[in-house]
Image (spheres, rainbow, N blue to C red):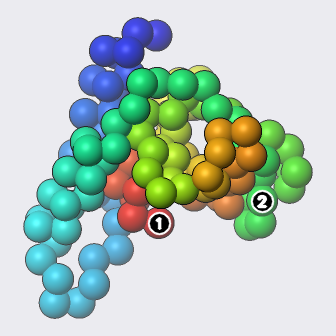
Amino acid sequence: MSREDLYRILEVALSDTAGVYVGQGQDAEAYYSQLRADIAASLCEPIHVSAIVMEPGFSGLAIGDFISGICLAHKAGYWLVYQPEQHQFYCFWGESPASLGSHGVYGTPLYCWSA
């Protein structure tokens, strides 16, 4: 899958706001726009990364298993990862790509980035 294909998938997925918590009194559209801008500012060259599954985990994976995908954006310990086989986005955490953890957060890119 090419870099352009991956970014196109991300761009389309950024319109989906499912699961994103918006605080009471907060302007939802402004918040979504802020998340989109933050992801755009954090785009990186797509790289393959893996993370250890941590509590609360994922259905079908044991705690301690590894999950992997292609990182499309990262910033301050947040890694937005796309798994083409599942057509799913995940959030990985950690400072180094050599030691990332994934705590069961997956869904839309905006949901993952806001977690």
Residue found at the far bottom of this picture: 25
The amino acid sitting under disc 2 is Met
Circle 2 Cα neighbour tier, 10 Å, few/some/many (<14 / 14–19 / ≥20): some
User: Can you give x and y, in whole percent of width and height, for residue 5 in the image?
Assistant: 34, 15
Residue at the image position 43 percent from the left and 51 percent from the top:
75
Q: Earlier in the sequence, mark 2 or mark 1?
A: 2
Nearest the viewer among 59 and 55 is 55
Circle 1 Cα neighbour tier, 10 Å, few/some/many (<14 / 14–19 / ≥20): few
User: Can you give x and y, in whole percent of width and height, for residue 92 in the image?
Assistant: 60, 50
Residue at the image position 34 percent from the left and 36 percent from the top:
43
Q: Report the residue marked by disc 1.
A: 115
Q: For residue 91, which numbered disc appears in the image?
A: none
Residue at the image position 42 percent from the left and 24 percent from the top:
45
Q: At numbered mark 2, what does the secondary structure look like: helix, strand or loop?
A: loop
Q: Gap in Å between the C-alphas at discs 2 and 1?
A: 15 Å
Residue at the image position 35 percent from the left and 66 percent from the top:
20
The amino acid sitting under disc 1 is Ala
Above or below 27: residue 83: above
Q: Would you say 112 lies left or right of 101 here? A: left
Above or below 52: residue 24: below
Q: Report the residue marked by disc 2.
A: 54
